[in-house]
Amino acid sequence: MIRKLTLALSAIFAVHATADIAIQAEKLEPKTVEWRRHFHQNPELSNREFETAKYIASYMRELGFEVQTGVAITGVVAVLDSGKPGPVVGLRADMDALPVQEVNDLPWKSTARGEYNGNDVPVSHACGHDTHMAMLMGAATLLAQNKDKLKGKVKFIFQPAEEGAPAGERGGAEVMVEEGVLKNPDVDVIFGLHIWAGLEVDTVAYRAGGIMAAVDPFKVVVKGKQAHGAYPWMSVDPVVTSAQIIMGLQTIVSRELELVEDGAVVTVGKIQGGVRSNIIPNEVEMVGTIRTLNDAAREHIYESLPRKVKAIAESMGATAEVTLPLDYNYPVTYNDPELMGDMLDTLVRTAGKDNVISRKPTTGAEDFSFFQKEIPGLYLFVGGKPKDVPDSEAPAHHTPEFYVDDEGMNLGVKLLTNLTMDYMNKH
């Protein structure tokens, strides 16, 4: 009886708290938009987010938080201490932009340029990280305003280089974890959001288990014997061998994985070899990517791909060298099922039942997964598509036309705030 009464009172408190946060978020919305547009006009590439970090750190200090800078080169970490015992909740936003030329005709469009792998390039927030930072700053503001209602601590993690560090460098969530971002104070759970250009404003999409794929780039070098193109019988042709390998790799997914359980992709995105039409070269190089949605499929492909490549090469009289992973790799972005079940009512109360969407996983990847390898975490998608734009006309991420509506951020601010407060009150 006492437990039922406690749960009922907790539910009533949660409903009232959610309503209060909604009012506060609406009042804050002009400021959230201002932050977003500042970041959008001043984008910086991975591991180069120096001015972005200064801007964020300055505001976090204004809120009275303990602030650490220079984490994983440019990362910013701020801690809100409620002064009361309770869990430590981590909230994460990524900071970096992309080497993409923006074509949208906006008063606050990006005209910035930067250096990417030795080249002068246009820079823009073509994946929505500007909104992610603004939403987390908004949540930090509301949590500071409601400090008396918190139990425990909140760690705000502004992460550089989610899109990948420049050549010859390391960065992102993996480096932040190595440098102790989840320690001192030890984070119990972490939440993150991604705005999505193809998902309607005011909606949130979730999935328990794998929601984004592991990514494992690979390289194959096929070595044969050079000859004149008119006399192929005098060669060991690495071009034909590579063609056989590419087709053979497709059978890993289609014939070796249980497709109803193990969604996966093996793609060869680059093949290079030879110098002219009538010379069969000595070698061919291929570079590709593997995407998997669970560890079993990932482990199987790690075993199968080198075995298949080398066997096909041997059958053609050639040899093959496989590098897997090539330079970086991300684990599966995995939403802890127990945590997802525990927090689903927060999504419903915040967005409304009809606006909470169970989605299929995507074969895109996210280095938020490095945090989830260490502690339970949830990664959610928040709608950024204007309601009057048909799904078929929504621009893709990482393109010059990419666009998300400012209105999408209000729900993100509320979600980050309510997830934090609800988790604290439940634990």
Image: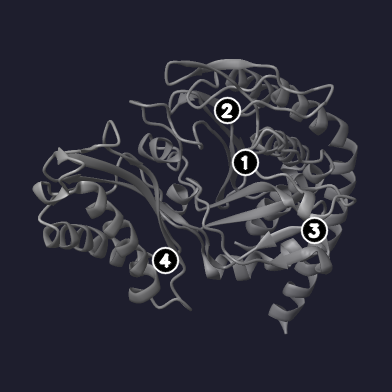
For marks 3 and 4, the one nearer the N-term is 4
Please name the residue that numbered disc 2 is placed on: 66
Instruction: Give the label on residue 83, or none.
Output: 1
Question: Vertically, is 303 above or below 156?
Answer: below
Please name the residue that numbered disc 3 is placed on: 350
Residue type of the residue flagged with mark 3: Thr
> Going 64% across and 47% down the picture, which residue do you hit?
194
Q: Dot 1: what SS? A: loop
Q: Quadrant of the C terminus?
A: bottom right
Residue 226, x across and y down, in percent: 13, 39
On screen, residue 112 versus residue 235, left or right, reads right
Residue type of the residue flagged with mark 2: Glu
Q: Quadrant of residue 133?
A: top right
On screen, residue 359 versus residue 375, left or right, reads right
Is there CB contact under 8 Å for labels 3 and 2?
no
Q: Is residue 356 visible?
A: yes
On screen, residue 316 versus residue 378, left or right, reads left
Is there CB contact under 8 Å for labels 2 and 4?
no
- In this rendering, the label closer to the viewer, 1 or 3: 3
Residue 323, x across and y down, in percent: 23, 46
Marks 2/4: CA distance? 37 Å
- In this rendering, the label closer to the viewer, 2 or 4: 4
Residue type of the residue flagged with mark 4: Asn
> Going 57% across and 28% down the picture, which residue do you hit?
66
Question: Vertically, is 18 above or below 61?
Answer: below
Q: Dot 3: what SS? A: helix
Instruction: Give the label on residue 294, or none.
Output: 4
Marks 3/4: CA distance? 30 Å
